[in-house]
Amino acid sequence: MPYADLHVHTKRSDGSLALEAVPDAARRGGVDVVAVTDHDRVQPFDGPVVERDGVTLVHGIELRVETGGQRIDLLGYGLEPSADLEAILERIQENRIERGRAIVDCVESRLGIDLDVTVDGGFGRPHIARAIDAHPETEYDYQGAFDRVIGSGCPCYVPRDVPSFERGQAALSESCRLVSLAHPLRYRDPEGALAHAAELDAVELHYPYGREVDRAPVERAIERNDLLPTGGSDAHDERLGVDGLSRRAYERLELTAE
């Protein structure tokens, strides 16, 4: 059982867990440390690392960036947002609302239903997939909605505007104590994603891919570039601690150092 789950989403982006419920969920999952890494959102924390009800909460963020060949996700930990990062996030949230409305309009028109959803700054495709799954007149469950309707290449998919890798990495490095490449083996070109790790501090080594994976390329990138391993469950529900770091591995990150 991991000591720290460093990849958790809440209702502030596309998770189903309320921020105030994270400590209870952490205790149920047997973890002592949780990094709240909502997509493109900062948290109402009074510091980069805070204590809540006996649980350590790391102020984190997940930011998607464009490398030129593919889009990848960066995880920032120990967040104290700079003006540049705040400007990036403001534009992303504006685009998220624009994109969300466009996808909702397409789904409702194509399927002939009313999704009855509120498109706000934390809105994402999982909200739409859950609404499709809950609608009695559709033939699609949650995964089917992604596979057939709103996933990449599907009829109602609309791409997001995201910052370049260079700008995103610079803004996160200025704002965070540590920046990590998220789930490197999920990308179309894992080696291409890992090539960018040399400009970061860490790589997410421990991650529940849901399939057999060869982590050797990730381990080689960590050794070659003298990086730190991070890990987490990428929770979008209330189940924390599915994956993560041991206490020793977490303490190596020195996120609580002054």
Image (spheres, helix red, strand yellow):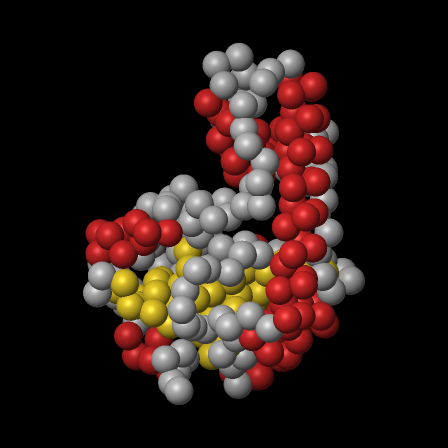
x, y percentage for residue 70?
72, 58
Q: Residue at x 48, y 14 (%)?
A: 136
**Residue 118 in the image: above or below residue 217:** above
Name the residue at 65% across, 45% down. 96
Q: Quadrant of the N terminus?
A: bottom left
Of the pair 18 and 210, the residue shown nearer to us: 18
Q: Position of residue 104 (x, y in %)?
A: 64, 29
Query: Would residue 171 be found to the left or right of residue 131 on screen?
Result: right
Identify which residue is drawn at 56% across, 75% down: 175
Is residue 244 shown to the viewer in this render?
no
Eyeballing the image, is 212 above or below 191?
above
Relative horizontal placement of residue 144, taking residue 43 as reference (left or right): right
Residue 234, percent across and down?
44, 54
Say if residue 242 shows up in the picture: yes
Answer above or below: position of 45 versus 251.
above
Q: Quadrant of residue 206?
A: bottom left
Location of residue 59 by image quarter? bottom left
Residue 249's spot in the image, x, y percent? Answer: 35, 77
